[in-house]
Image (tube, rainbow, N blue to C red):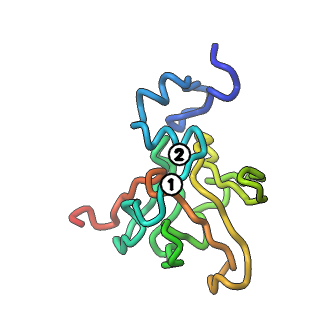
Amino acid sequence: MADAAEQSTGDGTPGIPRTDAEWRERLNAQEYAVLRQAGTERPWSGAHVDTKTEGVYRCRGCATELFRSNEKFDSHCGWPSFYDPADASAVTLHEDSSLGMVRTEVRCATCESHLGHVFRGEGYATPTDERYCINSVALTLEPTDPTE
């Protein structure tokens, strides 16, 4: 049996474990490095940084709805930014003290994949004063208009 770090609900079905080997088979190397090892894609390199397409952003690991395009804004940080998740229960927040600083990591609540970080402060000029800075590789975009 896989250890706790290797188990998750993965496909959104409660109680179905996904081992590290299954994650490696399901994800490409960059996706695995970000979603399972809390890596970060290079700024300005992601597919969704400048996307203006209306739709729903889902977790690449399990397809859970995470963010909506109407909550996305241009923060000029190099990663897609959102001011609020689609549903507060879709993500979990965890203290991240790596890199010699304290940040708040954002994970998918369904499959525990690393998504990015959330930053708080009045300087973001958003309705929530928050910036969810999310790796493009952690997301898939389901356009509202499928012809886009």
Give the structural element (helix, strand or loop) at label 1: strand
Q: Nearer the viewer, residue 109 or 105?
A: 105
Q: Position of residue 83 (x, y in %)?
A: 60, 73
Quadrant housing the N terminus? top right
Residue 34: image tag: 2
Q: Position of residue 57 (x, y in %)?
A: 45, 59
* Above or below: residue 64 compared with residue 26: below
Q: Nearer the viewer, residue 132 or 103?
A: 103
Q: Amino acid at mark 2?
A: Val
Would you name the residue on which mark 1 appears? 65
Q: Nearer the viewer, residue 100 or 132?
A: 100
Which of the two labelled residues, at mark 1 and mark 2, occupies the earlier sequence position?
Answer: 2
- Identity of the residue drawn at 26% across and 62% down: 146
- Identity of the residue drawn at 45% across and 43% down: 31
Horizontally, residue 37 falls left or right of residue 121, namely: left
Give the structural element (helix, strand or loop) at label 2: helix
Q: Amino acid at mark 1?
A: Glu
- Identity of the residue drawn at 74% across and 52% down: 96
Number of marks in the image? Answer: 2
Q: Residues within 10 Å of mark 1 (few under 14, many from 20)?
A: many
Quadrant housing the C terminus? bottom left
Horizontally, residue 97 falls left or right of residue 136, namely: right
Q: Residue furthest top?
A: 1
